[in-house]
């Protein structure tokens, strides 16, 4: 059974930092490009960042470039998102999944709230 367990979210002030983790199981994690997604209240889920299966290539949505860094540890089957200089508009539930159009079942996500 494929499973994603996201963690590391919390409450932070603008300018703060958080490091999210996503523990994956039930599939060949190291074979697939992976991605972080987020969904703010009343909004559709959006792609935030992707990373190639080897970790050599990453992409970011313009709004997080220079502030967020995605990495992965294939041995631990874990995806990471380092978020710095957080802004109120980063408030959302963050999820991980495959980067392709074909997705596995979503995990519960982890809530990130940035407030003044």
Image (cartoon, rainbow, N blue to C red):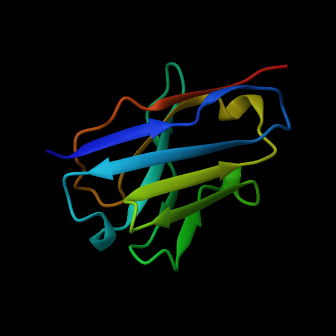
In x, y percent, where is residue 70?
58, 60
Q: Nearer the viewer, residue 44 or 69?
A: 69
Q: Nearer the viewer, residue 22 or 85?
A: 22
Quarter of image, res 109: top left
Residue drawn where x is 38% and y is 39% of the image: 5
Question: On the rendered structure, is 88 left or right of 53?
Answer: right
Image: 99 above or below 46: below
Residue in the image at 82% along x and 44% along y: 85
Q: Residue furthest left?
A: 1
Residue lying at the far front of the rendered structure: 76
Placement of the C terminus among the 4 image quadrants: top right
Q: Residue 31 sits in which quadrant?
A: bottom left
- Name above or below for residue 85 compared with residue 57: above
Q: Residue at x 47, y 44 (%)?
A: 37
Residue 91 on image: x %, y %: 64, 28
In the image, taking residue 76 as reference, residue 25 lies left or right, namely: left
- The x and y percentages for residue 90 are 67, 35
Q: Is residue 37 above or below residue 98?
A: above
- How far across and how far down the image is residue 102, in percent? 22, 55
- If the image is split into quadrants, where does the N terminus sit? top left
Number of callouts: 0
Q: Residue at x 30, y 37 (%)?
A: 106
């Amino acid at each position: 059974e494929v499973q994603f367990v996201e963690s590391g979210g919390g409450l932070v002030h603008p300018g703060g930092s958080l490091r999210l983790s996503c523990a994956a199981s039930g599939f060949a994690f190291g074979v697939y490009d992976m991605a972080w997604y987020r969904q703010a209240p009343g909004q559709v889920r959006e792609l935030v960042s992707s990373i190639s299966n080897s970790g050599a290539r990453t992409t970011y949505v313009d709004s997080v470039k220079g502030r967020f860094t995605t990495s992965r540890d294939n041995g631990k089957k874990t995806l990471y998102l380092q978020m710095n200089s957080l802004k109120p508009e980063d408030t959302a539930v963050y999820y991980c999944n495959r980067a392709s159009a074909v997705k596995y079942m979503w995990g519960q996500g982890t809530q990130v709230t940035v407030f003044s």
